[in-house]
Amino acid sequence: MLADSILEGLNPEQREAVTSTEGPLLVLAGAGSGKTRVLVHRIAWLVGVCGIPPEGILAVTFTNKAAGEMRERVEKLLGPEAEALWCSTFHSACVRILRREAGHLGLSRGFAIYDDDDSRQAIKEALRRKELDPKTHDPRRLRWRIDQFKNQGILPAGASEQATDMDAELTAELYASYQRILAENEALDFGDLLLQTTVLFQQHPEVLAHYRRRWQYVLVDEYQDTNRVQYNLVTQLVEEHQNLCSVGDPDQSIYAWRNADIRNILDFERDFPKAKVVRLERNYRSTQPILSGAVAVVSNNVERLEKALYTEREEGERIRVYHARDDRDEAQFAVRQIIDEVRKRGRPYRDFAIFYRTNAQSRPFEEEFLKYDVPYTVVGGVRFYARAEVKDALAYLRAALNPADSVAVRRIVNNPPRGIGKATVERAASAADAGGVSLLEGLRIVAGEGGRAGSKIAAFLKVVDGLARELPELSPADAIACVLDRSGYLRHLEQQGTTEAEGRLENLRELLAGADDFARANAALGDDERSPLELFLEEVALVADIDQHDTRADRVSMMTVHSAKGLEYPIVFLVGLEEGIFPHAASARDERGVEEERRLCYVGMTRAMERLTISCAEERRRFGSRSYQVPSRFLSEIPEELVEGELPGGPKPAGGGDYDIDYSYAQEAAGGSSTLGPGLRVRHPIFGEGSVMQVAGSGQGQKLRIRFDRVGIKTVLVRFANLEVV
DNA sequence: GCTATTGTGTTCGTG
DNA sequence: ACACAATAGC
């Protein structure tokens, strides 16, 4: 009975993937072939038919969002029983394990999780200690190189061993020093979460044995994007029972740059000789022209497993190609199409998505959406939890909960300004170093020495100590409110009274609301020994941009092609198909790079269900200046008969096509400017109204300094700003 | 120690 | 074109 209902609506291949429960299984799942469905039904099958307890199953996905959706769908099939299932990202699974087993690694159970920015600060500290100049040793680059080591499972000792020149030797040394600083701060970075878990399993076979016994069945989604450490983790767990189900698509491997290793999926049958392989080749998402076009592009890859994708949606319009004059025209074209379609056919905005190669490309689209009052959301860019004011507030929480976290302490010690300058902080840092204690303790030492600086520090310590006493008892939202009050942070912002400060206050209110939501949503599972506040900090550290994306809201979505993986939309605009952008210049140097870009293009195209529009611009603004663009080689790889519009080499469209776009106000300000001078009221299409403060230069390079009513002071280039005199 | 100014790099993608 | 960091001047 139950077995039938679980298999209902599945095709024969999907059924095979669901019911082949014992031993290693590789599911090669083409785009849109229902792989999430297979994973969900397989879990339901394991629990409902095979009688495996839900806590005996580990399912790992790429994003929190995918994990949440999978859990939801499993619950629909199984009911609340599914709650005991471990369904999460690699990172959150590892955090849970590490918190539990922290003692084995000599790690504090309350360790902090450092994001890119925090780890860069820790790298800077490592440079300071070695008296190296951050100018000659770029902290960002160092962080990147260390992260690469971690993704490959290489510890500092290994990095040192394989170093063949001075530079590599120094990097290895800094890696070691950076790890010491993290340990002192009781912190782990993203890479550590995975790497330290494999170290834990290696050094403590009894711990590994425990988890092996616990998880009799392991499922891994997006297997083509796993890196060496993730691979090690998985093989460690399944070595005995071999009940591993890996699902993936080599054509969608797009993370080689962060050490995802496509060989993990290609060598599956070698790694697991008894492996069964199931191919899902029937596509349920896209129309024939879209699917054929995407397959045609990716077929140009030499290193590729051939597979035969087919769709039953044979009807469907051809792929549209639009050659825009410039980036602005490209944006205008897409936005006008969307408005048209919404007005004429009554489509909801949520049916549309715009995908680009780089985050910086979102700008012109945002401008057009704002101009025409079209609701939209941008995924990515600056993460909400990475905004300065949000990170400041969180740093107070972190410092109060974990006084060893020197990166957090350094961030808040003079923020808001309380007269504790760089010299004082450095004094405290060396005192801390000398005594082998944390920065906060170093500050205590300096405070004890008295003097002007001493009393200022004492005031700061009083704030932090007070928070350390009060916060652990509070809910996340109350704790944040408390921090903002006691620290004087809120008062400081309110006193500024600028529009910029107003925006920051708005973000802080949003943070409070988010904390409140979190507490409410997690009130049910309060069985953890960790406080709601600690759980909130962890959540915040591990959310990805895409996790916060609300697909239910009626808005147009904009995101990078990378973020788009796993999503689908009826109407997709894939924009900026130009050499240097897509394929990106940095990847186009070697053939492997180009092949990954091509897979990325395949991912972008296969997101579209009904209509796919691809565009490129002849000219675009990059780094503030003009650049002439060449259409992407990927465009000419789409067979002509699948395309409507012109492929490269075809006739260029006349002007902006059949859309009458009003440029008049732009010309007005760019041309005549006899009245241009301080005091003049102008309107900017984005920033709104403002007063000119200062005029600099003339002709093409003329710049204006303007105080905008809404957004404060900005400098704009007259030629590009499209100003209108009010 | 604080603020305003200048200078620099940024934009390849993420948990 | 903008954000961020370093620096100069107070």
Image: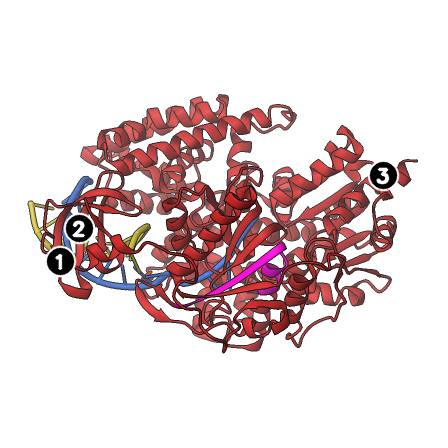
Chain colours: A red, B blue, C yellow
Q: Which residues are magenta?
A: A600-618
> Which residue position is annotated with label 1?
A696
Same chain shared by disc 3 and disc 1: yes
Dot 2 falls on which chain? A
Q: Are marks 2 and 3 on the same chain?
A: yes
Q: Tell me which amino acid carries mark 1.
A: Ala
Q: Which mark is residue A705?
A: 2
Instruction: Say which mark, if any, is on residue A52.
Output: 3
Q: Magenta stretch: residue A617 in it?
A: yes
Is A670 placed left or right of A12 in the picture? Answer: left
Marks 1/2: CA–CA distance = 8 Å
Residue occupying image coordinates x 57% and y 77%:
A591
Closer-to-camera residue (A590/A216):
A590
Residue A583 is tagged as none
Task: Pick the quarter of the image with the C terminus of chain A.
Answer: top left
Badge 1 density bin: few <14, some 14–19, many ≥20, Cα 10 Å:
few
Distance from the alpha carbon under mark 3 to that under mark 1: 73 Å
Chain-order first, disc 2 or disc 3: 3
- Kindly report the distance in space between the C-alpha atoms of the residues bearing marks 2 and 3: 68 Å
Output the chain of dot 3. A
Tell me: A115 left or right of A643: left
Q: Is residue A510 left or right of residue A704?
A: right
Asked whether disc 1 touches disc 2, contact meaning CB atoms under 8 Å apart, the reply is: yes
